[in-house]
Amino acid sequence: MAGARTHWWRAGPLTIGLALAVSPVSGVHASTEDVTRAPLLGVGGADSVAGRYVVVLENGSSDQRVQDVAAAAAAAGGTVRFTYRSALKGFSAALPAAALEAVRTSAGVSYVEADARVTTTGVQPNPPSWGLHRVDQRDLPLDTTYNYVDSAGSGVDIYVIDTGIRFSHNDFGGRATSGIDLVDGGTADDCNGHGTHVAGTAGGSSYGVAKQANLIAVRVFGCSGGAAFETTIAAVDWVTDVHSGPSVANMSLSGGNFQAMNDATTNSINAGVVHAVAAGNSSADACSYSPASTPKAITLGASTITDRRAGFSNYGACVDLFAPGDGITSAWWTSDSATAILSGTSMASPHAAGVAALYLGENPGAGTGQVARKLKRKSSKYKLSNIGTGSPNKLLYSRVDLY
């Protein structure tokens, strides 16, 4: 199980040393006579983080080239925060004007994107849960059972990129472990609740879809539930690097459209990690949000107990499926038996992560594209109303290996 691997770099604020700064870097800067600047994306956005940027190098760039560009940034007064090696080649940094110019004129830089805030996708109290009952049957009314394959996702790792997990919760039975804490470098314990709830829906023994999957906490949000894309990209980068065997990542989070987030997610999928992501809770076009707009991700809108799109759920062509997301009961962080009832596309996404784990448990050699196609092809068609302009009328179905 990959959850025990915690040897990854710790990415606290890191200023490149002066020894690097004073050394000449061959081939980093373009000629002053013909300066070519890498595109600068996302400047001035409502959620942008002042002075912070994600620097993305061209595909195939070496680690040495990343170090060279980071050194150029530091020499001009920048401070490197996270370094990306697997899902992206690049880094995030605080860059004053001179350092930003040095980076944009460095050889091999594909683009620079202003960092932006990202949030968990909604937590609000609602009536009792019903999600497991809905995903294993084609039609209403709901029955009182949830049927699933005996393997129940055994041998599959689900990476929960979120607020952490309460590992001792009774619903996890020792299957939940700490992967990495990108907030403060400790153990990825939950002090918010969102991540524990999401993990419970994906793989809890009582509330979860894939009841034998391994649950690995990748903590990107602190107790308040706020973060920036630089951290979520670092999480995807870590998962991409350490995963082995059948793996699913769940991102119940959302921010404005962010190219580097989408690129990192795409590269992670290409490397063999299935990604289930929340569509967002703005009752707007999901194509305007990240990671929801990542083409190869499985993007989930939220449905209600009456098979309608939840009023808060994003919609549109970037949504792949809808899943229960209104009034979902799952594990909570305040005690080993605590539960909470929450609503949001955050609650829809882990249903799909769990179904992906069920399929991979039975078909461990399946590729990421095969998993995504299977979930979409086997979905329950034309059951939903009020789906929103451009949305597919597809409801998640968990018994993907039956018929």
Image (cartoon, rainbow, N blue to C red):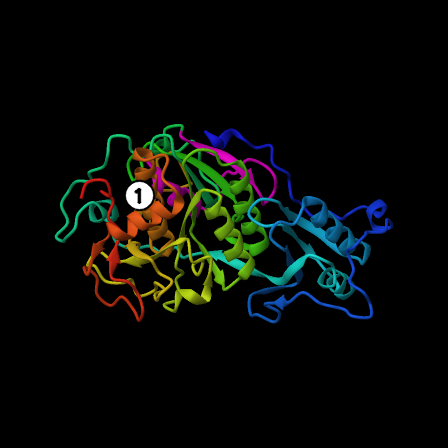
Q: Can you say which quadrant of the picture contains the N terminus?
A: top left
Which region of the structure is painted magenta? 175-204
Q: Is residue 316 left or right of residue 101?
A: left
Rendering coords of residue 209 (x, y %) = 29, 40
Q: Is residue 186 above or below residue 349?
A: above
The quarter of the picture where the C terminus appears is top left
Look at 39% across and 68% down and name the residue there. 285
Q: Is residue 37 magenta?
A: no
Q: At which x and y percent is residue 309? A: 27, 63
Query: Residue at 29% across / 69% down in the picture?
Result: 388
Place of residue 249 in the rendered image (x, y in percent of width and height, measured from the top left): 43, 44
Work out whether residue 326 can be spotted. Answer: no
Mark 1 neighbour density, 10 Å: few (under 14) some (14–19) many (20 or more): many
x, y percentage for residue 6?
A: 57, 32
Secondary structure at numbered mark 1: helix
Residue 114 shown left or right of residue 196 in the figure: right
> Was residue 185 drawn as part of the magenta stretch in this picture?
yes
Which residue is nearer to you in this view: 71 or 328?
A: 71
Whether residue 109 is visible, yes or no, is: yes
Which quarter of the figure has residue 253? bottom left
Tag count in the figure? Answer: 1
Q: Is residue 336 left or right of residue 82?
A: left
Against 103, residue 20 (above or below) is: above
Q: Amino acid at mark 1?
A: Val
Which residue shows up at 50% across the image and 57% down it? 262
Residue ID at (24%, 68%): 386
In the image, is residue 94 above or below residue 3?
below
Residue 186 sits in quarter: top right
Q: Which residue corresponds to mark 1?
A: 355
